[in-house]
Amino acid sequence: MLRQLLVGGAVSLGNIAIHAIVMAAVVATGRRVLKWKHSSGQTWLSVLMVAVVGVLLVAHVAEVITWSLAYAILDVAPPGADVLYFAFVNYTTLGYGDVLPGEHWRLLGPMAAMNGVLLFGWSTAVIFEVMRQGMRLRDQTTGA
């Protein structure tokens, strides 16, 4: 059990590092972009939000791929199972239950789910912060 916790913790920390780097870049870029002069506040904010969410989706896919690589290296998924699918099901807490991990690695699924929930929550917070800042700047420029 300790081995599972250590491996799951290491993969989770790796994903947290990926997410932290992406989040720092998103927030810094968002702040710079929001300072640009633009004529249509609503359209500009919409474009920014689509870009932010798109970048975050790419980050989450990278994190799922990280889990799938760990699963492949450790031979966690049963023979013939798609490790990327297995990683997505765990990370998103979808839990179809059609693919089960090997007996010696059962804790990795719940750890991936916990990691996904944490990182989805963090993404949600950043999405709302960028939107809040954008709406505040839009209102300042339109005098609302």
Image (tube, rainbow, N blue to C red):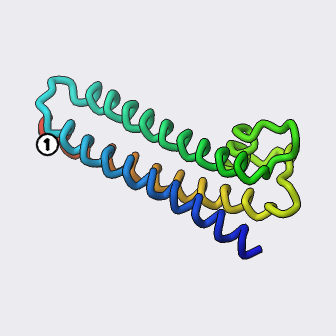
Residue 121 position in % (x across, y down): 51, 55
Q: Is residue 77 left or right of residue 132?
A: right
Q: Is residue 107 left or right of residue 79?
A: left
Q: Is residue 139 above or below residue 119?
A: above
| Residue 48 quadrant | top left
Q: Amino acid at mark 1?
A: Gln
Q: Who's the residue at 72% across and 46% down the image? A: 72
| Residue 20 quadrant | bottom left
Q: Who's the residue at 72% across and 60% down the image? A: 108
Residue 14 position in % (x across, y down): 51, 57
Q: Is residue 107 above or below residue 65?
A: below
Please name whichever residue, 100 or 76, is drawn nearer the observer in this view of the structure: 76
Q: Is residue 137 left or right of residue 89?
A: left
Mark 1 highlights which residue? 140
Q: Which element is circle 1 on?
A: helix
Q: Who's the residue at 44% across and 33% down the image? A: 54
